[in-house]
Amino acid sequence: MNARIDNVRAEVKKGVFPSLGLDIRVSRDPDPSGQYPDLQLLLATVKLILNGDCIAASEPLLSTEKWGSNQINFNADVPFPRDVIDTIEATRVDDLPLTLGVDMLCSYSDAARENRTAFFRSNLYHDLKKSQKEWAEILKKMGYSESWIFEIARPTLEGMDVVAEHLQKASDNLSARDYEGCMANTRIAWDAFKPLLDSKWDEIKALIDEDSQGESNHDPKSTRIKDIRDKIHYLANVGIHREAYKIQPDDAILCYYLTVSMVSYLSKLLKKAT
């Protein structure tokens, strides 16, 4: 039997874990006599594939529906917790080349074997590519629009887990509106990250300036990035001088976003350098 996915509708569903609700239509071709033998859809699983890997899947769909015509429709919810979003953002360049996969198990009466029950399994695929604009809209509807998605590379260096741990704490502080706590954890993350960077800075500088000739009357790219890095760290130190500075919500948000952006950038270079 030849079958194919010929229509998919997607809808964002909010919840503890946002999900993508999929309405899927599968069509099949008639047999040589022009008929559509009755099939019993027993089980279906729906998965989303990115670059050949399954990144998310629905729960198995149990069914007792008869498939007596040329098409059948079913619905599946594919969850999108934060780790799935992180996986996507770590590999996505612009558009999102998703593929929808559907595995179906059906039973039917085999006339050639005295109407004994036989089984039919089909693996179907459908292009579910989303443009960068469409993906941004999906993220927004899922509730991820208020946060930036960053990948923090983790070189095999002692202390990197401390950096990631305190950046997560800073994020939790923001969610709880604890702005002083956010600044404090951002500073601690920098204090742990700086020695790791300094120990490999010559190698990191070379990676930053690779294929960048520069200009005789301007600082090289690596010098400018180090200057920005040091100033973000300096900003994070405001939080320890409570008698002199009042931490406003936007101060903490700015410092957090600048820090995570710079740590994301430099951690990838640090990983290459180790």
Image (cartoon, grey):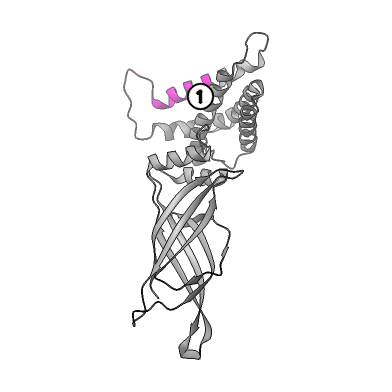
Residues 148 and 267: in front is 148
- Measured from the top left, where is residue 83 in percent x and y? 56, 45
- Measured from the top left, where is residue 149 in percent x and y? 51, 37
- Is 205 rendered above or below residue 56? above
Q: What's the residue at 47%, 47% (across, down)?
A: 11
> What residue type is disc 1 on?
Arg
Pointer 1 local density, CA inside 10 Å: few below 14, some 14–19, many at least 20: some
> Residue 244 lies in what quarter of the image?
top right
Q: How many marks?
A: 1
Residues 113 and 201: in front is 113
Residues 53 and 241: in front is 53
- Measured from the top left, where is residue 170 in percent x and y? 62, 29
- Measured from the top left, where is residue 234 in percent x and y? 56, 18
Residue 75 forms part of the magenta stretch: no
- Residue 44 relative to residue 69: left or right: right
Q: What's the residue at 55%, 57% (across, down)?
A: 58
Quarter of the image with the N terminus in it: bottom left
Residue 230 forms part of the magenta stretch: yes
- Is 231 rendered above or below residue 134? above
Q: Which residues are magenta?
A: 212-232
Q: Does residue 250 appear anywhere in the picture?
A: yes
Q: Does residue 94 appear anywhere in the picture?
A: no
Query: Would you name the residue on which mark 1 appears?
Result: 229
Label 1: which secondary element: helix
Residue farthest along the top direction in this orientation:
244
